[in-house]
Amino acid sequence: MDGIEVTLERHGDRLDLRFVVVGAIDNVVWPGDRIDGALPAEHADQCRAHDLWRHSCFEAFVAPAGAPGYREINLATSGHWAAYAFDGYRAGMRQASDVRLTQAGWRFDDRRAEVSLSIAVSHRQADWALNITAIIETSDGGKSYWALAHPPGAPDFHNRDGFVAILPA
């Protein structure tokens, strides 16, 4: 991969994310068929799945600034997605019932894959600290871990030192 570009915008309780993967995308293992697609919001609840991070997946970690708890949101190009709530660093993991996927889509061409999603997250009144991440699995079985910031050591997207993007309320 040559790189991943990310655009993020906040509109009240909604977070819009766009990932653009640039490079040899034919070498990436994409969950589902490699065809353009979208997940209508009315079908989102039926498409929740676990362990998406084991393969190519796009993620957002969202926390009210200064609070220990956070949400983890995952989306795969299969149309599956997940949202988890944590009380603190990897503590109290459970499905996040307060996160809704309102839009998701993906498209491919020879040198790019674009994945976009919109999610509604609680904590409307708080500034958000975020870590935006991706896991890219290649056809040789390798994985690369992408993030806005990587704290020292092995990749750990839950590490709050990686929550470097701040979006004001």
Image: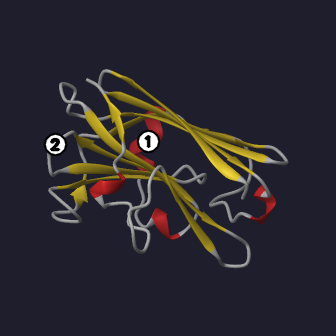
In which quadrant of the rendered view does residue 65 lie? top left
In which quadrant of the rendered view does residue 126 lie? top left
Looking at the rendered structure, the secondary structure element under dot 1 is helix
Residue 123 in the image, given as x and y percentages of width and height: 20, 33
Would residue 158 appear left or right of 69 to someone viewing this image? right
> As rendered, which of 78 and 17 lies closer to the eye?
17
The number of callouts visible is: 2
Of all residues shown, which one is farthest toward the top?
11
Q: Residues within 10 Å of mark 2 (few under 14, many from 20)?
A: few
Of all residues shown, which one is farthest toward the right?
110
**Front of the two marks 1 and 2:** 2
* Residue matched to label 1: 44
* Residue matched to label 2: 66
Of all residues shown, which one is farthest toward the bottom?
141
> Which residue is located at x 30 percent, y 21 percent?
12
Residue 161 in the image, given as x and y percentages of width and height: 31, 55
State if disc 2 and disc 1 touch (CB < 8 Å): no
Task: Tell me the quarter of the image containing the C terminus.
Answer: top left
Query: Does 15 sit above or below residue 159?
Result: above
Per the model, the C-alpha gap separating discs 1 and 2 is 30 Å
Would residue 146 appear left or right of 101 to someone viewing this image? right
> Which residue is located at x 81 percent, y 44 percent?
109
Task: Tell me the quarter of the image containing the N terminus.
Answer: bottom right
Q: Amino acid at mark 1?
A: Ala
Would residue 168 appear left or right of 88 to someone viewing this image? right
Q: Which mark is residue 85?
A: none
In which quadrant of the rendered view does residue 118 lie? top left
> As rendered, which of 95 and 127 lies closer to the eye?
127
Residue 94 in the image, given as x and y percentages of width and height: 22, 59
